[in-house]
Each structure stands twice: as structure tokens, then as C-alpha cells.
Amino acid sequence: MEALMIGISGMRGTIGGTLTPAVVMQYASAFAAYLKAHEKPANGEYFRVVLGRDSRPSGPFVRDAAAAALTASGIEVIDLDIVTTPGVAMMVKHVGADAGVVITASHNPIQWNGIKFLNRDSVAPPPEVIRKVIDLYHQQGVSYVKVQDLRKPTRNTETHALHVKRVLDYVDVNGISSRRYKVVLDSVNGAGCISSATMLSKLGCQVIHLNGEPNGQFAHEPEPTEANLTALAAEVKRQKAHVGFAQDPDADRLAIVDENGRYIGEEYTQVLAAKYILSRKPGVAVTNLSSSRMMEDVAASAGATVIRTPVGEAHVAGAMIRHNAVIGGEGNGGVIDLRLVPGRDSLVGMAYVLQLMAQTGKTLSELVNEIPRYEMIKTKFECRREDATRAVESVKKAFANEKVDTQDGVRVDWDRSWVHARPSNTEPIMRIIAEAPTGAEAEEKIAAVQKVVNEALGR
């Protein structure tokens, strides 16, 4: 039986295995107990929580178990049904809720599901808050109410339409529509099916929609990697389309295929979006330490600045808020524009890439070729957190004469390359990622750091 994964990013487990209705109810009950003990309801009377799910077949029972626990705790649950994760974040503020609950396992295969929470600012709660929720979960903490204090659950069906409308408010709809782009969209039968196809149609695109039924029956492994998107790439070539877009099941990540059927990947998603936004309004862009330095290249050409954060959407969004950033995201295909939602949003990514193409009149491959290219190598190995911490300290000392960032593990930068070594927040593993102009140079950087790590761990 696979382990139940519970950490600062939420809870994930397997259906018929570790993620049972009882586990879901206990986790949601712990969250409700935390809210009631440490927060005050926005309406001054009782808490309201929006709850949405991706399209997984297990979604209904996970949603119902979570909703039952929240309702039993005297919280008004607003059921959004199948919606994207950024859609849930958007609805938190739209309805004046105190929190959001997202039922999703992101890019994990169909046998997985999970739960993650959002606070009233539509972002993941800080680690110290989640740790308190986890403590309550382990203590079986609950705060159930008497019948007179129960709140009737409600439904809200606005999410898809509102999401599309708000994205379209920030692009030139007529300018994009005049190009009559042909787009192949792979929604992997996930939560993005409805809103994404609607938005692209409103942008005047001819949409060829692959895996466009929100039934959770993933037609391929759901993480939008090159190996999983061969059908999308082939269809772009067959259709002679201008671009191919691929979403993950909860539609917060976006990968891109160019007009030649070439997978250009997830790293380019935030870079191309940043290229569009910074060309109009140079300012601060934010990304995490493990994302490509293409962001610095794009920012430099626009006279803008890049700020790096620890890995994690909440870290990026928090820094964007603090620095009033105009764009941000992560290299896993996530674009963040605070004007819409303080979280990754694949619809924003699609709209901004199309806007850049329309604004410049260039093909996607031409836009990509304008950006300096790098090779990124990612490795990982099993490692206890205490061992990883010791290894990180050794790397800091070994590279003390270089430019070092210690916000999240350790990142070492040179003029055109970098390496980042960090323990995972969710698994007992350590990751070493490097990027350089060539794959050979990136491999050399990883080997140099791995040698220091091996010596520190006595391997």
C-alpha cells in the first residue's frame, strides 16, 4: 500500500488504499477546527468555504466526505463542482469566502486523489498554519456543532464563465481573433476542459480538442511532459496548427508544442507570458530558484528585474505581492498574474502566449528562437531530510567563493549556468537540478555537486 502523503502542500493518497473517506473527513475536520480556533469569519457570524474538485472518478466521494466534515463543523460549504484549481482560488474572493478546499492530486495518475487548502487571500496557507492543521489531524481534533448551528450547503455554477471573462479582460480579444489561430488543446479529460475550450473559442481560435470530456479518464499519463504528449505533437503537425497546448488535470500547469509539432516544454510557458507582459509594462517578475534563467534574459531585454524565491507556488505568489510584481510563475508550466488570481493558471498562460504571437506577428518557433536556449538536467535520489540538510551545508562550504543563494537548499550561479540542490518538501528525496548552455556543462555542474554530497553522506 502506498504511503499517505501529508505535508505543507496538502494531502495525497491512493483510492482503495490510503485516501479513505475517514481520512478525508478527519483532515477536513482538522482544517475546520483550525479555522474556528484561530480565524474570524469575514461575515462576523459563521465561516464560508468554497469547495471544488478536478474530474477524477474518485472526486465525488472525496468531495462529499470533505463537505460532510466541514458542514458538521458549522461551516457553510459552497460547492463549485468540477472546476480548475485557479477557478477555486478566484471564487474564494468572488463570494467573500474565508477559505477554499481543492480536491485534486494535480498531475498524479488516476488512482490518486488529494486535498489542498487555500486561505481567504486565495493562496496556500503558510507552512506554520498547515503544520497546526496536521497536528490537529493527528490528534483527531474536531469542532462539530449542534443542529441549530448547522449551515445549509449551497451550489455555485459561475466559476467557468467568470474565469474566462476575467482572463479575456487582459488581452486584445479582437487582435487575437483576427489571426484565426488553429489550436490543438489536450485537456487530458481534466477540469480545464470546459473553461479552456470556451476561452479559446471566444478568442476566435479554431479548436481541435483532444481529451476534452471532464470525466477523469486520463488518455495518457497526466503530467504534461514530452513523453506523455506525443499524440498532441503529432496532431499539431497533422492539422498544420499554429500551436498545441496541454494542461494537467487541475489546469494550473501548461505545456506548449510549437507549429512544427516540437515540444518546447513547460519552462517556456512562464517565459513567453513574461515576454508579453514585460514588453507592455516593465517591472518585477518573480520565479522560483529551480526555474530557467531564460526569465533573466527576457527581463533584461525589457529593462525589468527578476526576483527568485524558494520552490512552491505560495512562495512565488507571496513575493509577487510584496514586490508588486507584474508577472510571475514557476518552470513547471505555471503562470501567475495577480490581477486574476495569486496562483498558477493555464488559461492565463494560453491567452498570453496567443497575445504575444498576435502582437508580434511571429510564429511560436520564431519567438522561442529569440530567447537564449539552455539545457536543464534534473536528478533526484532517496535521502532523509536530516541527511539532505547536512549535504546542503557541505555544498555551501564547497562553493562559498561563488554566487550562492540559500533560501531553499543551496543554489550556485555562474554567468550562464547554475545548479540547485534541495531536499523535497513532500518526499524523503534530494533533488539536484542544473542548467547551462549545453547538456554536457549541466551534467558537469551536477557531477560536481553530487561529489560533494556523496562525500558529506559517506557514500
Image: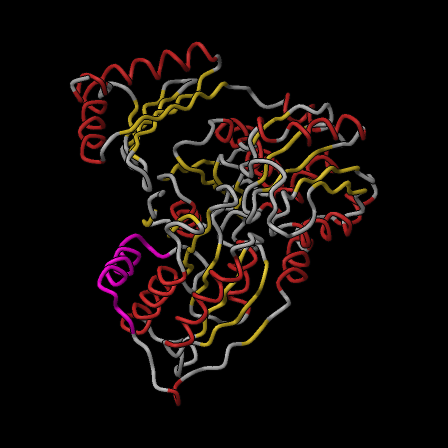
Q: Is residue 130 left or right of residue 284?
A: left
In the rendered structure, which segment of residues is drawn in magenta? 125-142
Q: Position of residue 73 (x, y in %)?
A: 36, 76
Q: Residue at x 51, y 59 (%)?
A: 89
User: Which residue is at the front of the view, 411 or 4?
Assistant: 4
209 vs 259: above or below: below
Q: Which quarter of the rendering shows the C terminus?
A: top left
57 vs 352: above or below: below
Q: Position of residue 293 (x, y in %)?
A: 46, 27
User: Which residue is at the front of the view, 112 or 74?
Assistant: 112
Q: Position of residue 244 (x, y in %)?
A: 69, 34
Q: Does the magenta portion include 312?
A: no
Q: Is residue 408 left or right of residue 98?
A: left
Q: Residue at x 41, y 31 (%)?
A: 290
Q: Is residue 2 left or right of residue 375?
A: left
Q: Does the magenta portion include 130?
A: yes
Q: Residue at x 76, y 25 (%)?
A: 237
Indicate the quadrant where residue 82 lies: bottom right
User: Which residue is at the front of the view, 449 or 69?
Assistant: 69
Q: Is residue 442 left or right of residue 365?
A: left
Q: Position of residue 181 (x, y in %)?
A: 79, 38
Indicate the quadrant where residue 158 lies: bottom right
